[in-house]
Image: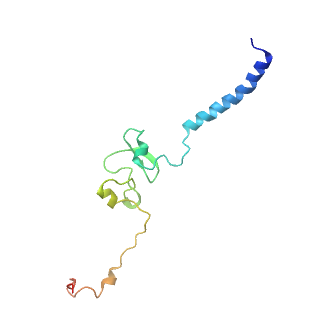
Amino acid sequence: MWTISKLRVIALLLPGAVALGASAGCSFVIESRDRQCERDADCSGFDGAVCDVAEGVCVPASSGTAGCEGPDGCYSCEPVLPEEFLNACTDSECVPYDNAQLQGLLLEDGSVPPVP
């Protein structure tokens, strides 16, 4: 049989339990990380999705390297194929070569002198 003291305990604990359950439920719905993915494998839970590494989100896969194009057209996903390694995005800086430095190294007809 319920007594007054048991009803008071339930009345005091019930709001706290409801609030705790609601806050725990939100943590399962709201993404707490700032990036959804870092590689294609992180998107395996989404059928046919790949990781857009630049944005850090899973996007639908389509033909070619959609979702993997980084700034200036480099390959921003984790490279696997040789052409992906050759075109992979890096944090390096491009420094153009000054062809004027070649003056005096070429013969007058534009050919390279023979090796001694």
Q: Is residue 54 left or right of residue 62?
A: right
Residue found 72% across the figure and 26% down from its top = 13
**Coloration mode:** rainbow
Residue found 75% across the figure and 26% down from its top = 12
The furthest residue to the top: 1
Tell me where residue 24 sits by quadrant: top right
Which quadrant holds the N terminus? top right
Residue found 71% across the figure and 28% down from its top = 15
Q: Closer to the camera, 2 or 19?
A: 2
Tell me where residue 18 sits by quadrant: top right
Tell me where residue 101 sits by quadrant: bottom left
Report the number of numbered marks. 0
Q: Is residue 17 left or right of residue 58?
A: right
The furthest residue to the right: 4
State whether residue 116 is above or below residue 32.
Answer: below
Which quadrant holds the C terminus? bottom left
Residue found 59% across the figure and 33% down from its top = 25
Expressed as whole percent of the image width and height from the top left, the position of residue 53 reads: 43, 52
Q: Is residue 116 left or right of residue 15?
A: left
Expressed as whole percent of the image width and height from the top left, the position of residue 41 reads: 40, 45
